[in-house]
Image (spheres, rainbow, N blue to C red):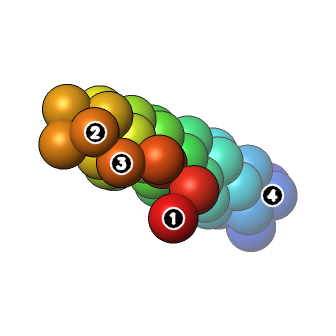
Amino acid sequence: MQTGENIQALRKIIDMTRLFSLVILGIHFSCSVIQRLRNGSSPLN
């Protein structure tokens, strides 16, 4: 039974890590777009 519980715990940790990485990526993207808009350039250049 311990092995099954360990696998479930590892899956939860991996899911949480993915979520945190997506949140960080979203914050980084938002900050980049806001900075470029303040400078007057297009966010796609």
Q: Which amino acid does label 3 sit on?
A: Ser
- Residue at image coords 57%, 56%: 44
Tell me: 27 left or right of 35: right
Q: In which quarter of the image is residue 6?
A: bottom right
Q: What residue type is labelled 4?
A: Gly
- Residue at image coords 81%, 58%: 4
Q: What residue type is labelled 2?
A: Gly
Q: Which mark is residue 45?
A: 1
Between disc 4 and disc 3, whose residue precedes? 4
Q: In the image, which is nearer the foreground, mark 4 or mark 3?
A: 3
Alpha carbon separation for disc pair 3 and 2: 4 Å
| Disc 2: which residue | 40
Q: Is mark 4 on a helix, strand or loop?
A: helix
Q: Is mark 1 on a helix, strand or loop?
A: loop
Alpha carbon separation for disc pair 4 and 1: 49 Å
Between disc 1 and disc 2, whose residue precedes? 2
- Residue at image coords 70%, 55%: 11
The answer to whether mark 3 and mark 1 are in CB contact below 8 A is yes
Q: In the image, which is nearer the foreground, mark 4 or mark 1?
A: 1
Alpha carbon separation for disc pair 1 and 2: 11 Å
Number of labels in the image equals 4
Q: Residues within 10 Å of mark 3 (few under 14, many from 20)?
A: few
Residue 28 position, x and y percent, is 33, 49
Q: What element carries label 2?
A: loop
From the viewer's side, name the closer residue of 14 and 21.
21
| Disc 3: which residue | 41
Tell me: 34 left or right of 5: left
Above or below, 45 against 43 in this view is below
The answer to whether mark 1 and mark 2 are in CB contact below 8 A is no
The answer to whether mark 3 and mark 2 are in CB contact below 8 A is yes
| Disc 4: which residue | 4
